[in-house]
Amino acid sequence: MSKKNNILLFVADQMRADSMHHMGNEASLTPNLDDILNNGISFENAYCQNPVCVPSRCSFLTGLYPHTTGHRTMHYLQRNQEEPNILKEMKNNGYEVIWIGRNDIIPGNRSKEAYCDEYYDGFSLENKVSDKESFFMKHTSSHKKKVTEAEMKDDSYYSFYLGKIPNQGSSEIDWNCIQSTVDYLDRKSKEPQGKPFFIYCTLLFPHPPYGCEEPWYSMIDRSKITQRRPNIATLKDRASMLYGIESKQQLQTWSDERFTELRATYLAMVSRLDYQFGIVVNKLKETGFYDDTNIIAWSDHGDYTGDYNIVEKVQNCFENPVSNVPLLIKPAKNIPCKPRKTKALGQLLDIPATIADMCGIKLSYTQFGQSMLHVVAGDDEHRDAVFCEGGRIHGETQAMEGGHGRESVYWPRLSTQSSEGPEHTKACMIRMGNIKYTMRLYEQDELYDLEKDPLELKNEINNPEYKEIIIQLKERLLQYYMETGDFVPMGTDIR
């Protein structure tokens, strides 16, 4: 039997595709991610399937769209223990599965034994695979403090901006994750040849708050920071969700200089994540695993980072800052590869199918991803269309994510989500070629021509020049929902 390749999945949280230097961002410092282009590929046009954490992760770890299984909220994870995901698949196919960092897919009161052999949450270096306690919720709830009215009225309160932070606190979580990864590789290299490994290392950075320690904080050249997209309040025919958030985040008084500092801090966070990625890659080389390891690096979704005068993210808007994400693949040495940046349209949902193809296994359930190995080998055509979706119907109070008062820094978004107007309601984006179309259930649709309007400033939905294109996009969207509306679990039940 031929030796199976190893897998390393390295996942950022809330990282934009254009935050990497090799994507043309002159202010960015990402030498280790950029170096993937010497031995692998980077997608220019990769999209998440939902622009917030839980729905996106429930999609890219399964190959199922958020609407297929109803994962459209931060509070609905894989509640059904029979739901498939790539962690269980790899464990059942003879891999030693090491899960390190973020969860956001399995309920916090469930042990991880069915999904992995070892689990490290980043709050310590202890293996917690058998624990049934949500350490994330326990940690975050214990750090809440009383907030004054004056603090909430400050124009920086809802900005998520911290700036330079000390080398301690929540920043240590990612360092613990990297240490756990390195420690495992060291242990594995000293063992007799056994199972191949599957490492799922998923970090917090560059998720807000926007704060980073030295030396990364000072490494970003502020003079090279790209100009922001204009305030959403100055643009016509946009999603009501964006208007609602912008009106509540209190950033109207911010100067360009303050936004530049926020964006520079975000890039510092990206640079630190890149440095940590380099630590892991160097350890793979040091331990002799690099050539036999497939590396896939990506982010669950992006971040507005001041574009449109908005920070953070939303659930049902799909501008490139929040939906266009990094996706890099360095295959094992025995897999054909043409190193480059590719313009092929890709989806995070394609990751499980790609892993299965890399490892020569067959997934045990129906899913909708497509292997990207032919793109790795040199093909610059992959999907004819990519999709991103989110929102709810009127009356779905369980999807509003309520219960957060004005003291929550997420209040501008969460309070807008609680409206029974059109703000938080269902929408789906489809991109074909350079055209992005968003169908909205309760308000006006959107259409952007990315070739003419790469910053997505002018909604062309009522432009008669695009009439035929809109018809084609709607027909493709109908096909998408017909193909992916559900999936039938394997096996039969006793009647």
Image (tube, rainbow, N blue to C red):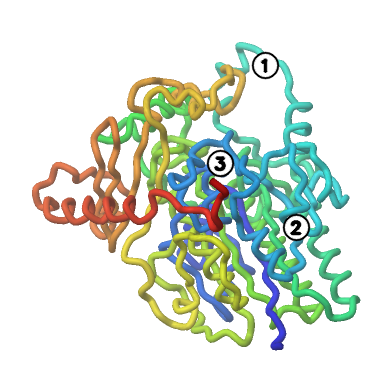
Residue type of the residue flagged with mark 1? Val
Residue drawn 62% across the image and 87% down it? 334
Upstream in the sequence, badge 1 or badge 2? 2
Q: Nearer the viewer, residue 31 or 345?
A: 345
Residue drawn 54% across the image and 68% down it? 328
Where disc 1 sits, the SS reads loop
Answer with the quarter of the image where residue 472 lies.
bottom left
The mark tally for this picture is: 3
Q: According to the image, label 1 marks what residue?
A: 147
Upstream in the sequence, badge 2 or badge 3? 2
Real-space Cα separation, disc 1 to disc 2, in angstroms: 40 Å
Q: According to the image, label 3 marks what residue?
A: 262
Q: Nearer the viewer, residue 377 or 319?
A: 377
Residue type of the residue flagged with mark 3? Leu
Residue drawn 67% across the image and 65% down it? 90
Residue type of the residue flagged with mark 2? Cys
